[in-house]
Image (cartoon, rainbow, N blue to C red):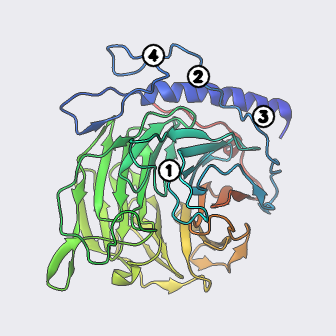
Amino acid sequence: MAPALRGARNTALALTLTTGLLVAGCASTASDPVRHVAPTTVATTTTSAPTTTTTLPSAVPTTTPTPVVPTVGWSHPATALPPVGGFTSLSCISDVFCLAAGGGSNQADDADSVGPGAVASWDGAAWSTPTTYFATSPGAAPPPWLPAISCTDGPLCAVADGSGHISVGDGTNWWPPVALAAAPAVAPNPADPGPGHAGARSAAVACPTSQFCAYADNTGHVATLSGTTWSAPQSFTTRVGSSTVALFQTGRVGLACATSSSCTALIAGTALDWDGSSWTASPAPWGASAVDGDTAVSCPAPGTCTAVHGTEVSTQTGGSGWSTPRVIDGNGHIDAVSCPTAAVCVAADTFGDVLRMTGASWGPPQKVVPSPSAYTGDGTTLSCPSVQFCMVLNGDGDFATYQAATPPVATTTVPPTGA
């Protein structure tokens, strides 16, 4: 990429982030379940959107790790700048705008380190110095657990974690995290060891537009963001023997939204579907066998989804039922899946292997990043905003990018602005 072009993109990206901050601004009233409050670096007026009074932090990276030169196929792996606790989630909206979230409490870390929640941004050539979205201090809320991030045009990003906190920002500037309202009390699942155990609390977030996000956690709570306000969470249950108890899954749960009126969450043996006004429950493709381990799902169109768990994949098309799961990765431990279209999907496992589906055929696992050595429990995450570009990232911060043979011009532009 020519230096002049990259400079123009960075300038445009900084302007876009400023616009995204103004769009994402919110106020708080006593009658709302949860609203985001303005960051301390921004002065507010009586209107609902904050007015910036100081220069916003630069979106241009202040450090320069080894840049990745786009090549056809998967690039050689390189090392990013890991925040405290490792990376746990990745979201890209173009080949020049990706966000990785990590930090906080990390039960898998060798030293059991605890630090602030952090986000690093990718501009197409290098990663920025991580910024803090979730500060920690004595007596404050517990550090985030396994943060998950989702970004959309604007840009607008949301980060959710297993402690029930959510933060919204533009990738550089972040509103302080807010705790969702208490969900209806449900009898605990006997498989749930409770907070503080590895994998016992995780959450997922999906934002298909700058005005809507969905949230789900591994204990059966779901909520939605409309405009600036999060709904009160709902609690979903399952039957264990003769008892009705809360849902529970060890590890990450899957959540994807094709539109603001079509979302699917997979929690253990239950699928939760959002139709724009309410959530409904139905059997998930794996049933009770999905209680242990990570689950991921991607939905490129309403009612059309691909889900992965363990060694297997299952699909649904046009709102039909889930297909019988089939093995695609003998290594197991598939952590993530991203489908830019119904005909193209990419999955990744915890060992740094990726698998690509074209049509209905899955290729064999291909090693693109090394297995993590420091943050071995963080898994692998990936994001494919188009059929031309993907990024995969492990917990240690090792990453690789995929570039199609003939990318169209549209894939090398700065993120589009939102409404």
Residue under circle 4?
51
Q: CA distance from mark 3 to mark 2?
A: 20 Å
Q: Secondary structure at mark 4?
A: loop
Q: CA distance from mark 4 to mark 3?
A: 29 Å
* Cβ–Cβ under 8 Å for marks 3 and 2: no
Q: CA distance from mark 2 to mark 1?
A: 22 Å
Which image quarter: residue 3?
top right
Circle nearer the N terminus (4, 3): 3
Q: Secondary structure at mark 3?
A: helix
| Residue type at numbered disc 4 | Thr
The percent coordinates of residue 171 (x first, y second) are 56, 38
The percent coordinates of residue 153 (x first, y second) are 52, 39
Residue under circle 1?
149
Question: For this rendering, which residue is in front, 54 or 224?
Answer: 54
Circle nearer the N terminus (4, 1): 4
| Residue type at numbered disc 3 | Arg
Identified at 48% across, 54% down, the residue is 148
How dense is the environment of label 2, judged by Cα within 10 Å: few (below 14), some, or many (20 and up)?
some
Residue under circle 3?
6
Q: Secondary structure at mark 1?
A: strand
Residue under circle 2?
56
* Cβ–Cβ under 8 Å for marks 2 and 1: no
The answer to whether residue 165 is above or below residue 11 is below
